[in-house]
Image (cartoon, grey):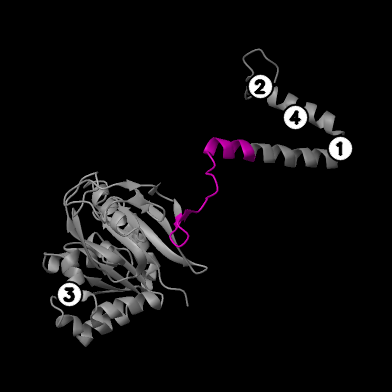
Amino acid sequence: MPKGPLMIIGGAEDKMRKPTILKHFVALSGGRDAHIAVIPTASSLGREVVDVYDALFTKFGAARVDAVRPESRDEAHDPVLVKAIDEATGVFMTGGNQLKLSAIVCGTPVGEAIRRAHERGAVVAGTSAGASVQSSHMVAFGVGGSTAKQRMTQVAAGLGLIESAVVDQHFDQRNRYGRLLMIVAQSPQLLGIGVDEDTCGLLEDVDGDTVMRVLGKGAVTIFDGSRMVSDAYEAARSKPLLASGVVLHTLPEDAVFNLTTRTLVPQPPAVQQEDADELAEAGRDLRQLARDIAAADATPAAIRRRLKLRRSKPAETPSQPPSQPTDGDSA
C-alpha cells in the first residue's frame, strides 16, 4: 500500500480568509469521515492552540479531533496517546519549538505511531516546527541571513518521514536562505527544502517516487547540492562558505517536483480564457460547417463565403410594432 501524503507547511497558514491548505488537509484526511489527531507539543500555548485547530477542522467537516500532547518522553509512551494516533486518518503537528518536538517525540512510541500512520496511508501534516520535524534532518535553531556561514545553525534528527532531506520554514519571510544552504554545504547528499509562510509542499507517492506539488500563496525553494563544491569541511567559525554548483529550484503554486529524481515535473501549459473562448467559437463554426455541408450538399468554398457573410452582417434591429390606426384610417 502506498504511503500517505505529507504536508509540509511553512507556518502562518491562512485560517480565516482563504484557508485552502487546512481545507485540503481535512479533505485528504477523509472529509466528513476524518478523524484527526492534533499534536501541539511544540507550542508554548495552552489548550487554546488545540481549540483553534479543533474549531477549524470541525468547521471544514472533520468528524472528530483529538489532542495528543506529550510534554515529556515518559508521556510519549502513554498508550492512550499512541492509540489516538493509530486510529487517526490525519495527524497534524502545530508550530512552536521544533527542537522540543523532536526531543520529546522522536524515538518514542508516539513518534513511531506517527511513522506507522504515514506507512498505512494516513495524511501527516505539520506547520512551522511540525513541518521541520518531518524530514530526516531538522534545523534545531539558528540565525537568519542570505549568506551561508559556518556554524550559523545546528541540526538535529527528525522523524525521517522525508528521507535525505532537511526542511526549513518561514523561509523567505525570515531570510533563512543562508542557514539552509549551510546545511546543504556541509551535507551535500541532503536536499534542502525551504517553505514560505501560507505555503505547503504536498508530498505523495507516485509509482515509488516522492513527488511534491506546491499549494498556497508563496513558494518552495530547493537546494540540490549533489554536484556542488564546498569548503565547509575546513572553513573557520562564522566564515562565509564556498558553495559552488548548487542547483536552485524556486517552485510557486501548482509547480510539481520529483524529490526522488530531483527534477521538475513538466506540467501542461495553462490556457488563457480568451484563447479558450476563441477555440470554442472555432469549434462551433466547424460543427455548423459540417451541418451545412450535410444539409445543402454545398461545396466547402461556398459554405466559407456564407459564414464570412454571416459574420460581417450587422445585427438586425428589432422591428417596430405596426402603427395603430388613427382617426380617419381604415380599420
Q: Residue at label 4? A: 307
Q: Residue at label 1? A: 296
**Distance from Cα at disc 4 to Cα at disc 3:** 75 Å
Tell me which label, 2 or 1, sits earlier in the chain: 1
Query: Of circles 3 and 1, which is in front?
Result: 3
Tell me which label, 4 or 2, sits earlier in the chain: 4
Q: Nearer the viewer, residue 127 or 134?
A: 134
Q: Residue at x 40, y 56 (%)?
A: 226
- The secondary element bearing badge 2 is classed as loop
**Distance from Cα at disc 3 to Cα at disc 1:** 81 Å
Left or right of 293 on screen, residue 101 = left
User: How crowded is the residue under tag 2: few (<14 C-alpha within 10 Å), some, or many (20+)?
Assistant: few
Q: Position of residue 310 (x, y in %)?
A: 72, 27
Tell me which label, 4 or 3, sits earlier in the chain: 3
Question: Is residue 14 visible in the rendered structure shown here?
Answer: no
Residue interval drawn in magenta: 257-280
**Distance from Cα at disc 2 to Cα at disc 3:** 77 Å
User: How crowded is the residue under tag 4: few (<14 C-alpha within 10 Å), some, or many (20+)?
Assistant: some
- The secondary element bearing badge 4 is classed as helix
Residue 262 falls within the magenta-colored stretch:
yes
Quadrant of the frame with the C terminus: top right
Residue 160 falls within the magenta-colored stretch:
no
Q: Residue at x 58, y 40 (%)?
A: 276
Q: Position of residue 117 (x, y in %)?
A: 35, 77
Count the numbered circles shown.
4
User: How crowded is the residue under tag 3: few (<14 C-alpha within 10 Å), some, or many (20+)?
Assistant: many
Residue 286 marker: none
Tell me which label, 2 or 3, sits earlier in the chain: 3
Q: Residue at label 3? A: 104
Q: Position of residue 253 (x, y in %)?
A: 40, 49
